[in-house]
Image (cartoon, rainbow, N blue to C red):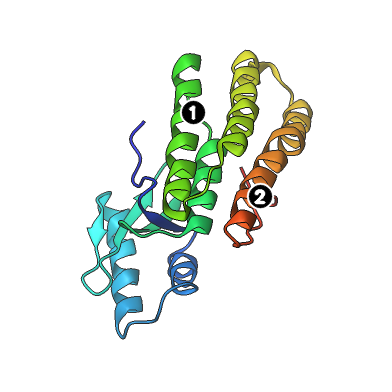
Amino acid sequence: MHRLYDEKDCVYKGASINETIDYYFESHEQIPGARNQLNAALSQAKKSGENVISAKTGLTAAWDNRNQEYLLIAKNEYNPANLAAALFDLLVEDPGAVDLDESLKDVDTLIDRYIGRIEQMEELDFSTEKGSLKNLMRTLRESLHLVDETELTEAEMERLSDQIDQEFYAPAAELLEKILERVAIPLKLANAEN
């Protein structure tokens, strides 16, 4: 699956242009004129369907049509909390109609690459956490592969969604929080939406 960013980048997402820009500036210094340029770049990215690079910030502005989100991508920027949040989003994202083996391989690759980047930058070992996260997410993908959502009622879908949140997404968020605690960066992912 082609992605707009990878583990070497920081990504700032939002449902609106202002939300996305505000998220970026929570952790970056304001540059005169940058807000207006980012606003125009995000708007153009959505209209054209093409990525736009902001000259003032060097950020890539993009529109994710699948998830209906604006993105600002900072290439080659390291922030472990941002990496953990991006990994969580990628793990809980619906993989779409893909082969189960491909889906499981994708889970392993994402976890190895994103947590591996944190390991490399922080010179820490997260083998245990990576193994636990892989087992958890592989079990989820295998279970979802067996479910035919078209045969579920709305109430059954809601119960399934709640069960997935409780049994898979909450523990995954806790594992990522433990990693960030070891690098002294608290992050709240448990309330993240799928």
From where the camera sits, is residue 62 visible?
A: yes
- Left or right: 18 as drawn, with respect to 193: left
- Left or right: 85 as drawn, with respect to 31: right
The image position of residue 107, as x and y in percent, is 50, 29
Residue with the mark numbered 1? 108
Instruction: Identify the disc placed on residue 126.
Output: none
Give whichever of 61, 81 is nearer the camera.
Answer: 81
Q: Residues within 10 Å of mark 2 (few under 14, many from 20)?
A: some
Circles 1 and 2 in contact, beta carbons < 8 Å: no
- Tell me the quarter of the image containing the N terminus: top left
Secondary element at image label 1: helix
Please give the name of the residue rendered at 71% of the width and 40% of the height, measured from the top-left corner.
171
Q: Residues within 10 Å of mark 1 (few under 14, many from 20)?
A: some
Which label lies toward us, 1 or 2? 2
Secondary element at image label 2: helix
- Left or right: 66 as drawn, with respect to 50: right
Give whichever of 142, 123 is nearer the camera.
Answer: 123
What type is the residue that disc 2 sits on? Lys
- Left or right: 56 as drawn, with respect to 81: left
What type is the residue that disc 1 sits on? Asp
Please give the name of the residue rendered at 74% of the width and 29% of the height, measured from the top-left corner.
160
